[in-house]
């Protein structure tokens, strides 16, 4: 069924803003965008709205939402991991599921239409897949002991064979980090990703201890693994940076690398391997990071950079509009237009989703902001306005959703 939507302005993310036109959709697909609007009773009148692609939250952990305000910024990353593991193990199913639903609602209200989420428990896949996002659900995998790698691989393959996905949802693989996944397991996951055409996401170069662990060995991370009875006595440092290490294991090609705070010397190989990266601004602020992803340098190279919220275990909010404002605050050399591109087509490109721009052939995933009659631009500024905490129109796959 054809639906025409009249708008005041529209951000395509692949050109200049269009004013006073119509967006035409057929079922779930965008058919046409014109700079003319007809007076037709069948037209949905959003003539006082700015429309734009829905936001893509390229990295989250919704299963940790129930830990909101239960952790404080730590003295050390390893201390935070210990506290997280302890609190997460105490969560019951009811509170975890309620947290997932509450977190999803907060994201939707702030304009997130697509999601890349790490799912540690496969039993949560039906719930996660039914949240209404266009999504990639990454099967989060931890296993530093090489002796467990084949078993973990087989378990993951069973899930990939069993879960066929849906038009809105597909599965991906998420080896947790270079300090928590064995070399053999990384290689197996690279093979599975190729066999089942899965995207791969991984926390990479988040902390300086990770680099030290791979180059020289790090007592704090080794100690954490030993506490968890997860240390591999056969493991030796590969004397490589996290990026070089993952490249040597064959997993870097088209990887979705999250955080990337210590990668300045490896931008060349990341560009060559077409690595996309996810910057999590409010989580970085929560931890008080001094080293941050070199976003300006990456964008100047034409690399794909997306935005993510991470989890409420290291963030005080899942409101994506606040992530936009936080990005502007801590990365003043990135323009608002660039931030919105990261938040939409950057995320869609990294996750391999058919959205992120408003153009013929793309999926009809878009959001709207009501603007006063006197407003005349710049249209890129509207989502950054301090008083905006939610969107005024929300549509995924051609279906609009109302919020109370």
Image (cartoon, grey):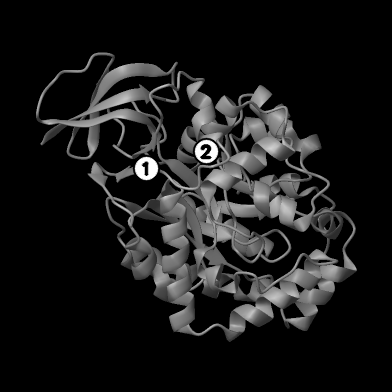
Task: Tell me whether the residue at label 2 lies in contact with that at label 1, contact meaning CB atoms closer than 8 angstroms.
Answer: no
Q: Which residue is mark 1?
A: 392
Residue drawn at the location 64% of the way across and 27% of the way down:
299
Q: Is residue 121 left or right of residue 183?
A: left
Q: Position of residue 67 (x, y in %)?
A: 60, 73
Question: How many numbered marks are there?
Answer: 2
Query: Which structural element holds mark 1?
Result: loop
In front of the other: 146 or 159: 159
Q: Position of residue 325 (x, y in %)?
A: 62, 40
Q: In the rendered structure, which disc, 2 or 1, sits on the residue that comes first in sequence?
A: 2
Distance (Cα) linking label 2 and label 1: 18 Å
Which is closer to the viewer, label 2 or label 1?
1
Q: Which residue is mark 2?
A: 343
Can you say which quadrant of the picture contains the N terminus? top left
Residue drawn at the location 51% of the way across and 20% of the way down:
378
Residue drawn at the location 67% of the way across and 28% of the way down:
334
Any mark on residue 102, and which?
A: none
Can you say which quadrant of the picture contains the C terminus? bottom left
């Amino acid at each position: 069924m054809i639906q025409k939507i009249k708008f005041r302005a529209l951000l395509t993310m692949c050109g200049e803003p269009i004013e006073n036109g119509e967006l035409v959709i057929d079922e779930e697909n965008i058919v046409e965008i014109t700079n003319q609007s007809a007076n037709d009773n069948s037209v949905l009148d959003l003539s006082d709205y700015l429309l734009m692609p829905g936001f893509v939250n390229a990295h989250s952990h919704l299963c940790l939402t129930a830990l909101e305000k239960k952790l404080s910024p730590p003295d050390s990353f390893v201390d935070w991991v210990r506290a997280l593991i302890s609190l997460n193990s105490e969560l019951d199913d009811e509170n975890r599921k309620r947290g997932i639903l509450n977190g999803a609602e907060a994201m939707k209200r702030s304009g997130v239409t697509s999601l890349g989420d790490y799912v540690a428990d496969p039993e949560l896949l039906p719930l996660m897949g039914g949240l209404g996002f266009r999504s990639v659900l990454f099967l989060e995998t931890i296993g530093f002991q090489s002796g467990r790698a084949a078993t973990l691989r087989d378990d993951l393959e069973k899930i990939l064979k069993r879960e066929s996905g849906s038009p809105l949802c597909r599965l991906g693989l998420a080896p947790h980090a270079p300090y928590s996944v064995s070399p053999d397991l990384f290689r197996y996951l690279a093979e599975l990703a190729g066999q089942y055409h899965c995207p791969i996401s991984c926390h990479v170069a988040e902390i300086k201890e990770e680099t030290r662990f791979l180059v020289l060995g790090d007592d704090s991370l080794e100690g954490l693994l030993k506490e968890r009875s997860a240390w591999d006595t056969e493991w030796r440092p590969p004397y490589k940076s996290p990026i070089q290490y993952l490249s040597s294991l064959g997993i870097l090609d088209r990887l979705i690398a999250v955080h990337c705070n210590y990668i300045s010397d490896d931008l060349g190989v990341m560009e060559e391997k077409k690595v996309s990266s996810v910057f999590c601004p409010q989580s970085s602020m929560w931890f008080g990071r001094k080293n941050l992803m070199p976003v300006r340098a990456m964008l100047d190279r034409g690399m794909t950079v997306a935005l993510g919220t991470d989890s409420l275990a290291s963030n005080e909010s899942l409101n994506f509009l606040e992530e936009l404002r936080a990005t502007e605050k801590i990365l003043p050399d990135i323009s608002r237009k660039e931030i919105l591109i990261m938040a939409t087509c950057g995320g869609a490109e990294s996750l391999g989703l058919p959205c992120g721009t408003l153009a013929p052939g793309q999926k009809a995933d878009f959001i709207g902001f009501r603007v006063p009659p006197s407003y005349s631009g710049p249209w890129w500024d509207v989502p950054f306005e301090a008083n905006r905490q939610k969107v005024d129109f929300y549509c995924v796959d051609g279906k609009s959703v109302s919020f109370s």
